[in-house]
C-alpha cells in the first residue's frame, strides 16, 4: 500500500498526522508527503497585504522570500527524514501571492480573505492540481486500491487547505479519501461539531505508540522557523502536541465521508 499525504503548506501533514506517518513508515509502508503550495511567488510585484506580512516577518525584499521558501523546504526534508517519508513539491505559490490575469488582481488581500471562500477564478487551478495528483497516484500504482490518499478536512478554513481538498475530491471522489484534522486549527473543538453531528461523516482514531509520538514531536521541531509562530519554545510545543494526542487516547483522528443517501 502506498500512502499519499497532501499537505497544503510545508508542515500541515506533519503537524496533523506526523505520528501516523511515522507509524506507517515504521511498518515498511511507502509514505509520500506532497506539499502543494510550495512554490515561489510568480510575479515581481506583491500585494500590499503580502507586503504587510513580509514586514511582520522581517523581510526586506523579494530575494528574502525566496530564501525563506528554500529554508522551509529544507526544514520539510529534515522533518520527513525523521518520520521516514518521501517529499514531493508543487510549484504553486502561497495564496497571498496568487492573482488573476490582470496586473495587481490579487485574489486574497486580507486575513478575512485567506480564511474566507476560495476565489472562483481559481477553479482552473483546482483542475490543474487534480490532474497532477492523479498522475502522481497513477505512477505510484495504476491500481487505485493500492493507494490511500489523505487530505485536510479544512478545519480553520484556510483557502489553500480548501484548494487541496477540492482538487483531491475532483481527482478521486470524496468517498475514497481519508481526511485529517488540520492542526493546530483542530485544537478548537467547536470547528469539528459539523462533522461530529453529521451522519455522513465517520471518524476513526489511529492509535500511536511512544516511538511514533516521539518521532512526530521531533519532526514538528524540524520546522524551526515556525515554532515561534505557534509556541513559546520547543519544549512548550512538545508538551502541547503530546497533550493534544492524549486527548484522543494517544492517537490521531481521521474522517471518512460516508453518505447515507
Ligand atoms: Zn496550512
Image (cartoon, rainbow, N blue to C red):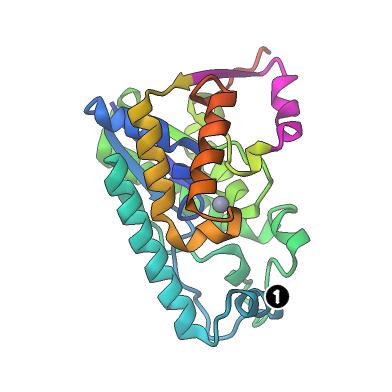
Image x and y of residue 238, in percent:
48, 42
Residue pictured at 65% horizontal, 51% vertical = 158
User: Is residue 193 something one can see in this rendering?
Assistant: yes
Q: Is residue 141 above or below residue 67?
A: above
Tell me the element at label 1. helix
Residue pictured at 61% horizontal, 81% vertical = 46
Question: Horizontal placement of 208 versus 95: left or right?
Answer: left
User: Is residue 180 something one can see in this rendering?
Assistant: no
Disc 1: which residue: 49
Image x and y of residue 141, in percent:
26, 33
Pick out the residue farthest to the left: 28
- Name the one closer to the observer, 3 or 122: 3
Figure quadrant of the N terminus: top left
- Name the one closer to the observer, 201 or 242: 242
- The stretch of residues the image draws in magenta is 188-205
- Name the one closer to the observer, 31 or 16: 16
Does residue 259 show up magenta in the picture? no
Pick out the residue farthest to the top: 260
Pick out the residue farthest to the front: 235
Image x and y of residue 29, in percent:
25, 29
Image x and y of residue 6, in percent:
45, 43
Amino acid at each position: 500500500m502506498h500512502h499519499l499525504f497532501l499537505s497544503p503548506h510545508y508542515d500541515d501533514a506533519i503537524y496533523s498526522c506526523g505520528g501516523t506517518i511515522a507509524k506507517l513508515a515504521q511498518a515498511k509502508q511507502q509514505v509520500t508527503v506532497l506539499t502543494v503550495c510550495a512554490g515561489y511567488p510568480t510575479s515581481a510585484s506583491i500585494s500590499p497585504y503580502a507586503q504587510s506580512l513580509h514586514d511582520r516577518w522581517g523581510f526586506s525584499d523579494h530575494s528574502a522570500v525566496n530564501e525563506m521558501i528554500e529554508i522551509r523546504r529544507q526544514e520539510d526534508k529534515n522533518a520527513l527524514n525523521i518520520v521516514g517519508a518521501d517529499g514531493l513539491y508543487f510549484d504553486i505559490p502561497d495564496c497571498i501571492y496568487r492573482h488573476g490575469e490582470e496586473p495587481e488582481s490579487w485574489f486574497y488581500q486580507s486575513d478575512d480573505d485567506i480564511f474566507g471562500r476560495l476565489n472562483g477564478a481559481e477553479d482552473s487551478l483546482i483542475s490543474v492540481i487534480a490532474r497532477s495528483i492523479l498522475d502522481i497516484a497513477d505512477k505510484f500504482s495504476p491500481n487505485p486500491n493500492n493507494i490511500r490518499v489523505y487530505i485536510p478536512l479544512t478545519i480553520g478554513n484556510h483557502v489553500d487547505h480548501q484548494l487541496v481538498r477540492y482538487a483531491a475530491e475532483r481527482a478521486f471522489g470524496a468517498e475514497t479519501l481519508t481526511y485529517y484534522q488540520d492542526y493546530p486549527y483542530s485544537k478548537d473543538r467547536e470547528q469539528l461539531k459539523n462533522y461530529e453531528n453529521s451522519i455522513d461523516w465517520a471518524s476513526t482514531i489511529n492509535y500511536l505508540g511512544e516511538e511514533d509520538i516521539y518521532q512526530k514531536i521531533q519532526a514538528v521541531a524540524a520546522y524551526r522557523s515556525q515554532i515561534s509562530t505557534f509556541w513559546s519554545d520547543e519544549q512548550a510545543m512538545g508538551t502541547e502536541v503530546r497533550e493534544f494526542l492524549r486527548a484522543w487516547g494517544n492517537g490521531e483522528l481521521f474522517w471518512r465521508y460516508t453518505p447515507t443517501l
